[in-house]
Image (cartoon, helix red, strand yellow):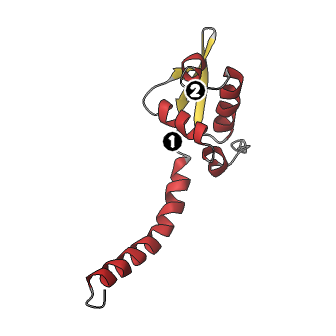
Amino acid sequence: MSAPALKHDVFQAIADPTRRRMLTLLADKEMPIAAISECFPITRTAVNKHLHVLSDAGLVSSKKVGRETRYRLQPEPLIEIKQWLDFFEQYWDEKLLALKMFVESDDA
């Protein structure tokens, strides 16, 4: 049996600053939606929608504990972003080296 397809891709999920901040909050601990909602100036419904996008992208997992739902960061999908950024790092290295050489040259 294959894994279910993700509804949102990781890049779309982290495009929103609110969702990125939620990931940061969940990096250290599991949190219930009520505690997450207290950290944002948006409605609990809006927080829930953001968490669903993160969940659909595989970036958070949820579990029921009594009457509340707790969320936890699942960082594995972020590897895709790191690999993408690593590819472009070579271009930054080249540009910074060229800038260094220009600044240190006698012509500058």
At x 52%, y 44%, the residue is 76
Q: 105 or 35, which lies in front?
A: 105
Q: 68 or 45, which lies in front?
A: 45
For badge 1, the amino acid type reads Pro
In three-dimensional space, the C-alpha distance between marks 2 and 1, rounded to whole angstroms, equals 22 Å
Label 2 close to label 1 by CB (< 8 Å): no
Earlier residue among tags 2 and 1: 2
Dot in front, 2 or 1: 2
At x 25%, y 90%, the residue is 106
- Classify 10 Å Cα crowding around label 2: few (below 14), some (14-19), many (20 and above): some
The local secondary structure at tag 2 comes to loop
At x 63%, y 37%, the residue is 54
Question: Is 27 placed left or right of 99 in the picture?
Answer: right
Name of the residue lying farthest toward the bottom:
107
The local secondary structure at tag 1 comes to loop
Q: Name the residue under label 2.
A: 40
Q: In which quarter of the image is residue 34?
A: top right
In the depicted structure, whether residue 95 falls above or below residue 83: below
At x 26%, y 82%, the residue is 104
For badge 2, the amino acid type reads Phe
Q: Name the residue under label 1.
A: 75
In the depicted structure, whether residue 93 falls above or below residue 18: below
- Classify 10 Å Cα crowding around label 1: few (below 14), some (14-19), many (20 and above): few
Q: Position of residue 27 (x, y in %)?
A: 46, 34
Question: Is 44 placed left or right of 32 in the picture?
Answer: right
Name of the residue lying farthest toward the front:
108
Quarter holding the N terminus is: top right
In the depicted structure, whether residue 102 falls above or below residue 86: below
